Image (spheres, rainbow, N blue to C red):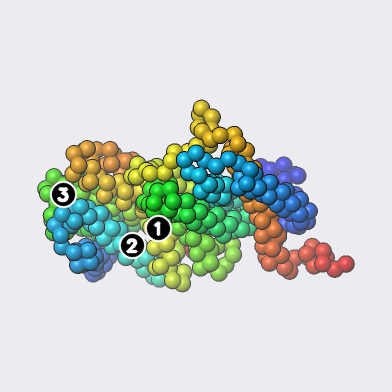
Amino acid sequence: MFGPTLDRYAAPKFFYPLAGRLVPWLGTLAAALLLLGATWGLVLAPADYQQGDSYRIIFIHVPAAWLSMLTYMVMAGGAFVFLVWRMKLADMLAKCCAPLGAAFTALTLVTGSLWGKPMWGTWWAWDARLTSELVLLFLYLGVIALRGAIEEPQRAGRATALLTLVGVVNIPIIHFSVDWWNTLHQPASLTRLDGPAIHPAMLTPLLLMIAGFTVYFVAVLLQRMRCEILERERDARWLVELDAP
Amino acid sequence: MIVQVFRRELLLAWRRPGDTLLPLAFFVIVGSLFPLGVGAEPALLHAIGPGVVWIAAVLATLLGLPRLFAADQHSGALEQLLLSPTPLALLVGAKITAQWLTCGLPLALAAPVLALAFGLNFADLAVLLAGLLLGTPLLYLLGAISAALTLGLRGGGALLGLLVLPLYVPVLIFGAGAVQAAAQGFGAGANLSLLAAMLVLATVFAPWAAAAALRISLD
């Protein structure tokens, strides 16, 4: 299925040093993007004519929401590869994604609720997107809890992978059902067919923040996977040799 | 083999009527706790009635789910099913069907009686019953996957709830929504059709996923 190159890097022995070389670069890039995006968004971008300065939480809220969903997709990809090809690294990927995704989802809910108070006059509304985001948080917690409950790593990985894939099938259904049920949230402003409905002066820093969050996610994910490799392969010979000199 | 598994499940349920009656009693008790908690205002009860019945049905289903595979695991019958040449998904499907017939169907049939206590009229009762007849098998199909995943785990019951309740969200929304839509004069057709569509999807995929989960759990 995979070419020989990808196969080689999928082995923990090669992935570990590769990730080690990438993490500092990605970390620096993420810090630069986030710093630039945050300064631009919080200081330089104009205030909104309707929402004033309080709209600026969008620069945290939207990237966190984007990451909360991207992380689930990455996790599901890892779960699928692990279930089908039994690739250890894919399971580690899925395992490391879950707490990150839960954190991004929680961040989305908290910032959304902080934004909702001045805008809608309430901390929480049973609105479609809020509710699907909350259900997404429950799915993440279920995945984490199931892995925690099973001692044997191989079985834990496969059971969690199956649950993750069941979740993926359900996410669109859940989202659609909640959408049907109740909608107060503004419709998507970035991904529309006729172009984004947001002024360029605000769009640029927002895209910078989204890029920054994504690079940050990749950097932290790689670092977590390195820790996971150290833990699981602690008796492997290549690791002992790596430590020797 | 499929027929034998199915008959065995029905026979077991017949000899242990408690397994059927207990969730049923739980269902009625949960439903009757709501008026005690929120007050006996008829207008309020009428408004929350369908939702309460659905939530009680979901919780009563949850109560029976851990038993779906646990007894067979203890007796060793489950391993025999795994070794059988008949595809495991079909056998799991037979078990789920039998479980629904002995636990889900009585629940759905008892629901109108409970709903009467919330002051729903007969037209709404029919919609509620139709929704539950479509929805309760869905609850068992989805629940079987989680029951198989948590088989034999410490704290399996609470974990099962955490895994399965998010998956029940659409069923709850469309099921309770059908009655509300009918009561507001929109007609329940759309909600019931969506429930039926989900039921068809789950009938095809859920036994297969539950079978895969069983293989993982008994690995």
| Residue with the mark numbered 2 | B62
- Picture coordinates of residue A111 (x, y %)? 50, 54
Residue hosting label 1: B164
Chain name for mark 3: B
Query: Are discs 2 and 1 less than 8 Å apart at CB?
Result: yes
Identify the image quadrant of residue B113.
Answer: bottom left
Count of numbered badges drawn on the protein: 3
Q: What x and y, as percent, mark residue B66? A: 37, 65
Q: What element carries label 1?
A: helix
Q: In this view, does B56 lie to the left or right of B202?
A: left
Within 10 Å of the Cα at label 3, are there few (<14), some (14-19), or many (20+) other Cα atoms? Answer: many
As helix, strand or loop, the secondary structure at mark 3 comes to: helix
Which dot, 3 or 2, sits closer to the camera? 3
- Quarter where residue B29 is shown: bottom left
Figure check: A226 above or below B86:
below
Percent x, y of residue A193: 50, 29
Q: Distance between the residues labelled 1 and 3?
A: 27 Å
> In the image, is residue B173 above or below residue A50?
below
Same chain under badges 2 and 1? The reply is yes
Reading the image, the residue beneath label 3 is B125
Quadrant in which the N terminus of chain A is drawn: top right
